[in-house]
Each structure stands twice: as structure tokens, then as C-alpha cells.
Amino acid sequence: MRDLSGPLKTICWLWAAAAAAVHLYFGGFGFPEPIQMRGFHLLVFTPLLFLLYPAFASSPKNRPSLLDWLWAVASAVPHAWVMWNWMAVADRMEYVDPFGPTLMVLGITCIVTLLEAIRRAVEPGLAWMVAGSLAYMQWGWALPGVLNARPFTPAEIVEASWLVPTAGGVYGPLTGIVATTIAVFILFGAFMQGSGTGRLFSNIGAAVAGRYSGGPAKVAVVTSGLFGTMSGSSVSNVITTGAMTIPLMVRIGYRPAVAGGIESAASVGGALMPPVMGAAAFVMAEITNIPYGDIVVAAAIGAVMYYFAILAAVHFEAKKLGIEPMPLKDIPAWREVLADAHLVLPIILLVWLMTERWSGNYAAFCATVAMVFVSLLRARTRMSPRDIVESLANAGLTMAPLAVSIAGAGIVVSALTATGMVVAFGGIIKQLAGGNLALLLILLATTVLVLGLGIPTTPSYIIAAAIGVPQVLELGKGMGVDMLAAHLFTFYFAVIADATPPVAAAAFAAAAIAKASPTITSVHATRFGIAGFTVGFAFIYDPGIMMRGGLVEIVTASAIQVVALTLITSSYAGFLLAPTHWAVRIAMGLAGLFTAFGYVTTDTNRLLVGVAALAGVASLQWASGRTAARTQGGTGR
């Protein structure tokens, strides 16, 4: 992002704040017609990106060029036209009414400027994927076999990508959910940070975990999980919490790449944390028509398990390396923590409204307004008018890249649907799986991780869900796999793709802070975030993990994950109660994998195997430690 100064900086800052304020108003008092809202959303955010993000490394870093201003104006024209002519757009008969030269020029302008905005402000990989989808519509008729698509005229391609708001494209339902619910939740997160809730979370993390072995690493895990309630961006979490925790971890003995890996794994998991979770969770609610509150409940245990696994891995690593707790001077007293405790009230309000089935955007609106008033209760948290405007501006600057990335994902989904590639690619995966659900899930997980190499979590999830979820539902019908389980499986792998090599946005951000190799950092992030792989499959095979069934089923499913993750993390750390021999490590790892993935037997057998392995190794190490202590004591006498 450019480092603007002077009047232009103020203008862009106020522009972002005003755009966010309008979204907040609509969230509380009702939205205009869908096509109007989607057009407005892209109108206020797309031009801003050309002023804030340089085109190339050699472009001016402190001011937009004349070409940037032309890009900004051009990007505004199609969306302004849609807003002005919204009734005509809403009344059009898609693919029936003529798509004349004026619409063609506007559509091409919209698509080209959108691609450039994505390339600059989001990921070049996503821009190439959108362009590739358009190219496939144009030339897919020349490809052989299952890749063959019917011929499309240029007008059909532009219309499908731009002006078919009921099915996909730029103004499709995906843009709609971002412009409404997700936007208001981003505002809530920005106001949480502006009120000092971030300080509350950091202090809670330090007070709870700082006194134990590997303190700063555990603080990073706890704090990042709490920050996940107000930010769906893993990179944002890394930058916010990592600036404090990574240097502390390095200072007390963690290697820089390991410190960056711990922080990035913890920050990625923020998108899994209820009650807000990430933007993809709201898209899931829109796609599946499942209430967001039900998604939060189903994802809750899985999110806790993800962070449990990271904490266990950090603990074993710290014990093995002999890393001490945080210095006492760096651990806040509980009175310091409690001084900000009133800031949890808006979060409680949000959760209550969601459980009462109020709409997500209205619940977030009420919680955001409540955050302002609650902050006034104490001088240290009181939000001034400048703080409020700054929170609005920060929310707007967060919304802008998300707006264009989701619109781009809408074009991809539209192209996949119009060409039949969703069915064809799904058929390819299904054919490779040969009717085996487990193999299908492995292929789908691999697809999501590959998509994550070049595009953010939400577009990755959207595209993978369109391709793979129908196949999972078909093969899993006999096992009771339903829509929510299949989507949560896809969602979890889309989230952890942000931390897996070779391209991992969160790990790269953490590596920059740690001054370590991005690739090595992402490898460590993957091993600390191993729970994402086991929990993802548990959504399909262990429905108790989604709080389904009776108390026994829920407790059993949760216990299986706890035991499996403890065995796996202890195995690769080489430590349980004491350092473990390589042969024992292998045996523990195998026992952990069987406990997690041994679906060929009953849940009870899996749990017994895991508990026996864990208890056996712990007992042997405990007895060995007692013997060594007695021997040393006798020698000392």
C-alpha cells in the first residue's frame, strides 16, 4: 500500500470511513435493492484501490500517477451506471434481452478494471485465475474430452461475468453477502480494535499463558485465537499479534522460523473461531441456506481442537528445548486485565442476538454501536470522535480488497457453472476416487490446498465448494454426510492453506517479522497447525465433533481428537514427559494417526488404542524419571 501524505491521504482516509459508515447504517436500518447495494459496494471501494496500491514496484510510492487516476475513474463508471439504472438491470431477462454495444463496453471496462484491482491489491494468482476462467469460456470449445465446452459469443461471456446478478458474476450473491453481512462484521472487528479490545485479548493471553514453559509462544496462540473473533484475515492477525509475540519468542530461545511458524499457524486459526469466524463462514451460510448460528455451533469444538493442538505442540517443543516462561515484568497483573473487562459486553450481545436468530448484519450493527457506548464506561477505553472515524476508515480499508476478490471469485463461479466445468471437474475427481469417499476427500483437500497457493481463503473455499461438495454429498449419502459437514470440511482446508508451503500468505508475513526463510516458516506453520487436517476429516466421519448426537457421542468424538492430537504433536516434538526415543516417536505417531483416522473400527476401539498408547508411554517415562531421581539421590548420599 502507498504511503500517502497531505490532503490526498486525508481524502482517502475519509473516503474509506464514509463508505464504511454507509454500510454500517444500512446494516442497522435496512439495505437498498440487492443490485443497488452491490453496485454501491463496488463503486465506493474499487476506485480507492487504484489510489492506494501502486501498479508496479517502480511506480510512485507516495502518490498515484495520472494513469492510476484514469484507472480509478474507469473502474467507477460501470458500477455508477448499474446504480443509476438498477431497475432496468433488475427487470432484464438474462440471455434474452439484447446485450448491446453500450453494455458491452461497460462490461469489459468493469472486468478489466476488476482484474487490475485484484492484481494490485489482493493476489496476482487470483487475477490470473479469473482471466483463465474467461479464456476458458472463449476457447473451451477447442479442448478435448471432459474439458470441452460449448461455444460462447463475446457478448454471452461478458453478460455472464458482469450482469447476471441472480447466478454469479460481479453482482452475484457472493458480492451481496460481502456488501451486507460481512461488511458489518468487519466494522465490528474494527471497532473492537479501536476500543482497546485488542489490548484486552493480549493481556488475557499473557496473563493466562505467560507463566508457563514457552510462555510467549502460548501467548501467541491464545491471543491470536481471541483476535480471530474480530478479524477474518490471517495476515492481519500475524501483523497485529506477531509484532509483539515473535520477538519475545526469539528472545527466549525459539528459532526465528519456528517462532514465525507458531504465530502464523495460530493466526490462520482465527478464521475458525466463533462467534465471528472469517468471511468464508458467512459465504457458507449464504450458499447452504444454513443459519449462521448453526454453523458457529457446529464449528466450535473443531476450532477449540485446532488451538489445543497448537498449544500441545508448543508445550512439548518448549519442554524439549528447556524454554522458560515469560519474564514476570512482561506479564500483566489481573487488575490490568480486568480494567478492560467491560469490553466483552458487546461480544456477549452479539452472541446472544445470533443465538436468538436475529440477522447477522443487524446483530453486528447492534454490537458495533454497543462497543462505542461501552467504551465510554472507562477513560482508558473511551473512543473519541477521531477514534470512531479511524475505526470506520480501517474497516473501509479492509473491505476494499475483499470486495474485488469476492467479485472476482463470482466471475470464476459463473464461468465454471456456465461451461459445465463444475460438473466436469467434479466428475474427474469422482472418477479418480473410484467411488471411495476417503480418497475423494483427500483429492478435494489437495485441490483446496493447491487453490490456496495463489488465492485467499474465501475465494478458494467458494471455488472448491462448487467443485467438490456435490460429489462428497453423493458418495457420503449412505454415511449420513450432510451439507454442513461437507462445507465445513472444505472450509477448514481453505483456512489452513494460508499457512502451508510453498506459498503461504500468513507464514510469509510472519517470516518478515521474524527475519526468517518464508518457506521454512511455512513448514513449521504446517506442523504446528496439523489439527486442521485431522479435524477436517472428523467433520465427515465423527459427527459428534459438530455437537450432534447425545452427550456420549459428543464427548467421545472430542476425546478422540484430544488423544490423537496429543499423540501426533508429542511424536513430532520428540517429548511427552521426557525426551522420547525415535522408535517410540514412530509408534506414538502411528497410534495417533490410527486414533484420528481409523474409521474402519468403532470409535471406542480408536479411543482405547490412543489412550493405551498415551498412558503406556507416559507411565514408562514417569517410572524412568522416578528411577533416575532415586539413583541420583542415592549417589548424592
Image (cartoon, rainbow, N blue to C red):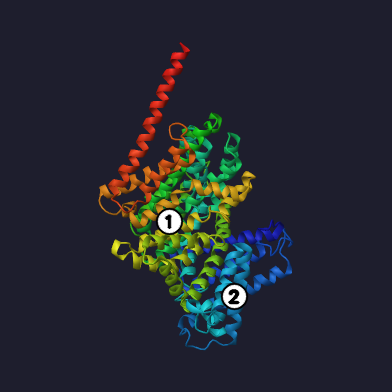
From the viewer's side, name the closer residue of 447 and 226. 447
- Badge 2 or badge 1: first in the primary sequence: 2
Q: Is residue 550 visible?
A: yes
Decide: few, some or many residues near mark 1? Use Cα within 10 Å; few <14, some 14-19, many ≥20: some
Is residue 467 positioned above or below 611 on the image? below
Q: Residue at x 62, y 66 (%)?
A: 119
Residue 110: assigned label: 2
Q: Amino acid at mark 1?
A: Cys
Q: Quadrant of the N terminus?
A: bottom right
The Cα–Cα distance between marks 2 and 1, rounded to whole angstroms, is 34 Å
Q: Position of residue 345 (x, y in %)?
A: 42, 47
- Residue corresponding to mark 1: 366
Residue 317 numbered tag: none
Residue 364, x across and y down, in percent:
44, 57
Q: Quadrant of the C terminus?
A: top left
- Foreground residue, 408 or 501? 501
Q: Position of residue 524 (x, y in %)?
A: 54, 46
Q: Residues within 10 Å of mark 2 (few under 14, many from 20)?
A: many
Q: Which residue: 54% across, 70% down?
A: 40
Q: Nearer the viewer, mark 2 or mark 1?
A: 2
Asked if residue 30 shows in the view, the reply is no
Amino acid type at circle 2 is: Cys
